[in-house]
Amino acid sequence: MPFARGAVRQIAAECGACLRPVQLRRTDTSTSQVEQVLVPCGNTLASVCPPCAERAKALRTAQCREGWHLDNEPVTDTGDPDDYQRWLIETRAETQAKRDHATADREDTAELDALNGELDEEITRAGMRGNVLPARPVRRHRSTRRRQNAPELPGAQWRLGRSARPTPPQTARPSARRCSSP
């Protein structure tokens, strides 16, 4: 009896569909509607995804045949912000400055955080792309950290090094054997 996953892969390969599609989230900027979309992986190695590799090979062949070579890079025109968008950005900057001062003074920032969140949403609704502030990296948690509720491991007792322990004074004693030089 064949496995279902193997049968699906075989049928997809025969139909020319990608074997490893990537799931992306697409947001319509005019309606703010979010939908999930499966996009082909675009791999160029036939050992990984034969349909995508064949598709990429055909595309490269067509581009070389047609002479696809750009003389210069395309320019994307973003446009200038209008007055309302400027006001939103300025207000967002002021509330962020107030939040930074409150954090430095160790005050509660919950109200300012909520206001910043609302302003970020309004900036997105006003038709501006991207984030006002770069995302702050989340603290990385290591999976190898020792659990707190685990018992102590048996092991050798550690001693302090020589530099941490005072040494008792010693008296120099001559050696019993003397070396005679010829």
Image (cartoon, helix red, strand yellow):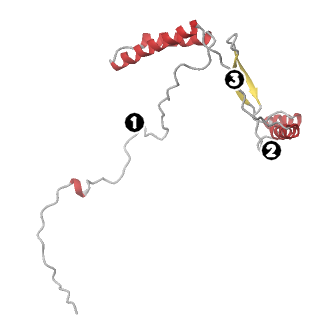
CB of mark 1 within 8 Å of CB of mark 3?
A: no
The numbered mark, 1 or 3, whose residue comes first in the sequence reads 3
The numbered mark, 3 or 2, whose residue comes first in the sequence reads 2
Q: According to the image, label 1 marks what residue?
A: 148
Could you say which disc has been placed on residue 46 in the image? 2
Q: According to the image, label 3 marks what residue?
A: 76
Res. 168 image quadrant: bottom left
Q: Secondary structure at mark 1?
A: loop
The numbered mark, 2 or 1, whose residue comes first in the sequence reads 2
Q: Secondary structure at mark 3?
A: loop
| Mark 3 and mark 2: Cα distance apart in space | 34 Å
Horizontal side of 175 relative to 153 (left or right) equals: left
Horizontal side of 75 relative to 170 (left or right) equals: right
| Mark 1 and mark 3: Cα distance apart in space | 54 Å
Tell me the mark number nearer the camera, choosing from 1 and 3: 3
Q: Secondary structure at mark 2?
A: loop
Give percent across and percent down for residue 30: 70, 11
Give percent across and percent down for residue 21: 75, 32
Q: In this view of the protein, which residue sits in the foreground, 108 or 96? A: 96
